[in-house]
Amino acid sequence: MEMVPLAPNCGVEIKGVSLAQAEGETLDAIRQAIYTHGVALFRGQEDFTPEAHIAFARRWGGIDINNYFPLTDDHPEIAVVRKRADQVTNIGGGWHTDHSYDQVPAMGSILVARTLPPTGGDTLWAHMGAAYDALPDDLKREIEGLEAYHTADHIYEEGGLYAKTDMGGDLRGQGLKTGATHPVVIRHPQTGRRLLYVNSAFTVNIVGRSREESLPLLQQLYAAATAADNTCRVAWEPGAVAIWDNRTTWHYAMNDYQGHAREMHRITLTGEPLAA
Ligand SMILES: O=C(O)CCC(=O)C(=O)O
Ligand SMILES: [Fe+2]
């Protein structure tokens, strides 16, 4: 197994492993690399079938079923992240952290490229440990001990962000109500590293402050989070798989392939409660 960083502060490519076979010490090393680098890219995984995808996720731990994305007919564990050639809107086309609106947010995801556009459709990640470390000391002091409220309702509800687009009809769960409170700075459950844990998609306000009062601080943190130094970018190819840690990273799916279809298979991995 060989590990090559994707960028100085975010992401790693892991070479010389077959995810369909990985278990035991190999799986432990993969896990550790993802906790540290935030996201790992694996190329040449042509034998990572839907069955292998599910089996690998079970070897990792629990599977969370996503409440909003369409599921594959044969495998309810697999969510379909699909944009048809005639659709304009994509899924995940803004910086976000999956499932931060759950009180026990998903640990991460395993995303497999199934149908790719001729060019474009890259995914970007930003490392929230690097983002926290780079904050000025006075801003670190200002956010010490704060908590924030997260929900997905404004994104997925009837009349919400997606419902207003041509992606609205594909999504489920419009009647669901979500809401969770997390520290603004968490410690990674495995590595102990301090991570910025607010995001522009699902974080609504700082606990004890209105949305309006919260926005200046949140926007300052969001701008710092996606500084180029914290990010990495993956250009997909057939057989590529990415596994990321939602606590450690944000991600962003580029929507620069209008007129072409793109389809990814995602399994969401169960996480644990987060603490400061
Ligand atoms: O399609 C992608 O590259 C990522 C989409 C996304 O945000 C997700 O699967 O959570
Ligand atoms: Fe996402």
Image (tube, rainbow, N blue to C red):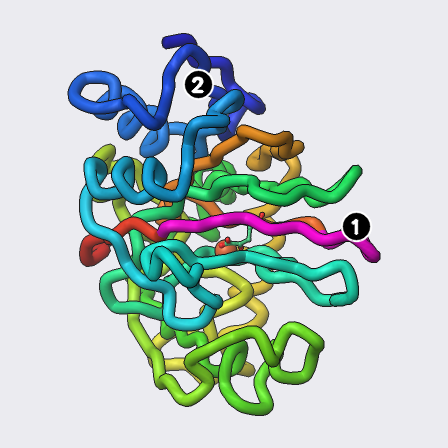
Structural crowding at the residue carrying mark 1, measured as other residues with C-alpha within 10 Å and reported as few (<14), some (14–19) or many (≥20): some
Residue 80 is marked as: none
The residue to which callout 2 is attached is 14
On the image, the x and y values in percent for residue 209 come to 41, 81
Q: Which residues are magenta?
A: 255-267
**Which quadrant holds residue 103?**
bottom left
Question: Measured along the vertical axis of the image, is residue 78 above or below residue 17?
Answer: below
Left or right? Give the position of 166 relative to 107. Answer: right
Which residue does the image show at 36% across and 59% down from the upper left? Answer: 184
Q: 113 and 74: which one is in front?
A: 74
**Residue 143 in sight here:** no
On the image, the x and y values in percent for residue 193 come to 29, 36
Q: Secondary structure at mark 1?
A: loop
On the image, the x and y values in percent for residue 208 come to 35, 81
The residue to which callout 1 is attached is 257
Q: Is residue 264 magenta?
A: yes
